[in-house]
Structures are given as C-alpha cells and as structure tokens.
Image (cartoon, rainbow, N blue to C red):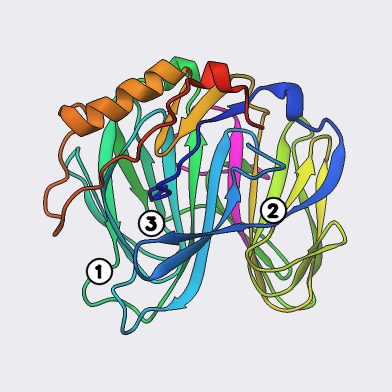
Amino acid sequence: MSNLDRQAALTVCGGRGFVVAEPVRELLSPRRVQLGESTEVRRLLPNLGRRMIGAWAFVDHYGPDDIADEPGMQVPPHPHMGLQTVSWLHEGEVLHRDSTGSLQTVRPRELGLMTSGRAISHSEESPRPHARLLHGAQLWVALPDAHRHVEPHFEHHADLPRVTAPGLTATVILGSLDGAASPGTTYSPLVGADLALAAGTETALPLEPDFEYAVLAMSGEAEVDGVPVLPGSMLYLGCGRTELPLRAVSDAGLMLLGGEPFEEEIVMWWNFVGRTDEEIREAREDWMASDRFGEVKGYDGDRLNAPEMPATPLKARGRVR
C-alpha cells in the first residue's frame, strides 16, 4: 500500500533516544487519511507521539468497509525502497502486482510480504468482482542498513503457524511467538501476530523483555494490560515485559507488533525509507525520470506521480519526532 499523502513530510525515525525502556500504556489515536476514492485509512504510525515500534515504521488500519457498489481499494503503481510491506486482511481480497512480475491475490489471514530492497514498484486493487467487505491492515518494516539494498522480491504465505490457548488463536505473521515461527523473511528481530479472542477470554501472551511492543485493535472490545482498546486505536507498551495480559469483552481481533528497538536513524518520505535527505531526493527523481523502480504490467491506469518535496533540506529543518 502507498502513502498517498500529497503533502508528505520528511521524517526522521529510529534510534534509541525515544524508546521507552520500561512497561508503559500509551494509547495512540489515528490520523484519518484518504486512500483513493473509496478507502479511508486510520494511520497509527508514524504518529506525533511515536515514530517506530522495533522495525515497524508504518501502520494503517482500514475497514470494515462495505464496497459492494464501490471500486474498493485502488492504489496505482508507485515506488518503494528500503522497506518491507506487510499486507494483512480480516475480510476481502487484494490483488498485488509488482515490477518483478509478481501477480498474487491476498486473502484473509494470508501473508503478502514485499521486500522492496534497493527499488521496486507495485499496485494494489480490489479484484473485479470483489467481496462485499474490506477490512485489514497495511504495515511497513524498515530494513537495516546491511540489508536495505537486497534484490526486491515478493512472498505469499497462505499457511502460517498458530499459537493456541483457551479462547485465543494467535497467527504468527512475521518473526516468532511462543516457539512458533513465521516462514516470512525478516531482517531484524521482530514479531507480528494476529490475535483472535473469544468473548470472556482472559489470558496472557509470553513476550521478550528486550522487545518494545504495541497492540493494534482491529475489531470488537478488549482490554490490553487493563486498558480498553477500541478498533482503530493502538496501545504502545514499551519494553521490559515478559507477558501481556489480555481480556476480551466481546469477540475481538488484535494485532501484536514488536521487535528490538531499531538503533539506526532512518529518513522516511512518501514511500521511501533511506538514511539521508539526498538519498530520498535522488529516489524521487529516479521514479519520475528513470526506470530504476521497474514497471508494473497489467494495471489498468496510470502510475502515481511523486509529490513535491520540501525545498529546505532535512538537515536544515531539524529532526521531526
């Protein structure tokens, strides 16, 4: 999924300076962003109060939307570099195309994982015809410097491992949880898991004390470490936890995100993750004027143009937290 913000800001993220080294309960409110003509997303990361959670650098939650008479998701070809995109659905389908030639329909509880590496472009759209409802999350994982120039590739994993307990099913999307490991490729220690809780369930998940964590509420009513979380909100939990208490008031869906704090500082702008202002500006020019990001074949429509960048270089603007 793209960041379609036409006023995209240069943002510095990462580094340990803003990592909370102890358990906290910091509720993050979303910013509403229009994605195409018929899809509105709730953007949780980057957030005014929190830029990253481990290597997780971007989180959008959307739906459930009734798109029976709408085009649904329509994201034209656009570029990425320096990151992985994670597509995760609870309802509906998304058709992925990219410049490596990948063509894949991603369905609920299946992992669509695109590693942009040095450069890739892709599109995402609701198939024709498509299901009535669309509900899911789109997330980005920042690649560490040692791996951010890898060859671009796409992975689709329909069968993912699960951790179960009475009233709880945890599907491991990326990384590992309680001994279960996802087949998705990762480049830094992290975890992403989908938690399905039955009404009345009270349980606890084992956590890694060196990770920082957050929980994204997808549906239903639940409490995370005693804090009520409503759909479209995210609770930042800090570090230093060995377990996470969960309580479901109704049937509920949550996403657990975590990882070792990301030590490197990164620069995010539009759909790029880099390390310097100059690198980001070069990527924008390459998207507009060269074939560096390849071509997405088969999409019925034009590709996205990049927005204008701020005239003042990032290093002169100060860091944005």
Q: Is 112 situated left or right of 263 in this image? A: left
Q: Is 59 situated left or right of 260 in this image? A: left
- Measured along the vertical axis of the image, is residue 132 above or below residue 12? below
Give the labeled residue for mark 1. 127
Q: Earlier in the sequence, mark 2 or mark 3?
A: 3
Q: Quadrant of the C terminus?
A: top right
Q: Earlier in the sequence, mark 1 or mark 2?
A: 1
**Is residue 297 in the magenta section?**
no
**Is residue 181 in the magenta section?**
yes
Indicate the secondary structure of the residue bearing disc 3: loop
Q: Residue 14 location in percent, x, y?
A: 62, 27
Q: Residue 249 location in percent, x, y?
A: 78, 76
Indicate the secondary structure of the residue bearing disc 2: strand
Q: Residue 246 location in percent, x, y?
A: 79, 61
Indicate the secondary structure of the residue bearing disc 1: loop
Q: Nearer the viewer, residue 74 or 263?
A: 74
